[in-house]
Amino acid sequence: MNTSSISRRLAVPLARISLGSAAYTAIAFIAAGRLDWARGWIYALVFVAASVVGSVIVHGVNPGLLEERAKGMRADTKPFDRVFYRAFLPLVIVYPLVAGLDARFSFSALPFWTVYPGVFLFVLGSLVTTWAMAVNPHAESTVRIQNERGHALVSRGPYAIVRHPIYAGTLLGLPGTALMLGSAWSLVPMALTGLLFVWRTAREDATLRQELAGYADYAETTRDRLVPGVW
């Protein structure tokens, strides 16, 4: 495949991810009611840059995965994952709204220095999720057994450390977002989101043990689901 063909294949998902990321960060600015918000711009730049750079890396190493992830729900998506998304999607809209309102009314403003650990946690979480998607061609956005795509166990890279590294990276990035935006109140919906991911991890792990060849043996050697040495 030549360079121009690769570029065309990347252009559509990259444009979708770029525009989607920018639109998502705009929620916080709309709630804040202003554009002269340094923390908001730091968050927007870090969020969009991490999304775009991660997508370019994943496309280069694991072509086709971005297109598969964009397909969303499938007919064979597990019922528990449909429940997860019904709770997750509203929450993921709520916390930038809360952070923006916090910036407008100063309900629970955090000191500016919290931006720095926030950026660190968010970037670290993005690196973990990008690494996981780069090595796992079956890292779709919903939970299902991908029989038509030859679903096979992946145990290398971050999967040798924890069994669900994409979720682990997500949980690192959630508090990073609140710290970047400077809103203690936004930690509440983020904590609920984190609990949802813990529940999803437990359900997905049980499903893979039962339905994916080799997963039960893999779980005996890679014992932790999300946090090394903890769970």
Image (spheres, rainbow, N blue to C red):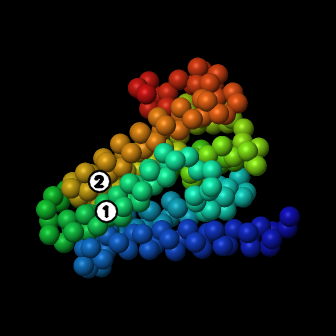
The x and y percentages for residue 109 are: 17, 60
Task: Decide: few, some or many residues near mark 2? Use Cα within 10 Å; few <14, some 14-19, many ≥20.
Answer: many
Q: Quadrant of residue 31?
A: bottom left
Image check: 108 left or right of 64? Answer: left
Residue 81 image position (x, y, % from top left) = 50, 48
Amino acid type of the residue tagged 2 in the rendering: Pro
| Image x and y of residue 89, in percent | 41, 60
Q: Residues within 10 Å of mark 1 (few under 14, many from 20)?
A: some
The residue at which mark 2 appears reads as: 189
Q: Which mark is residue 184?
A: none
Look at the image and tell me whether residue 67 can be seen: yes
153 displayed left or right of 205: right
Q: Which residue is mark 1?
A: 94
The reply to whether residue 121 is visible in this rendering is no
Tell me the quarter of the picture where residue 145 sits.
top right
Query: Residue at coordinates 50% horizontally, 64% vertically from top-left?
Result: 49
Q: Which residue is rendered at x = 73% and y = 57% of the image?
A: 63
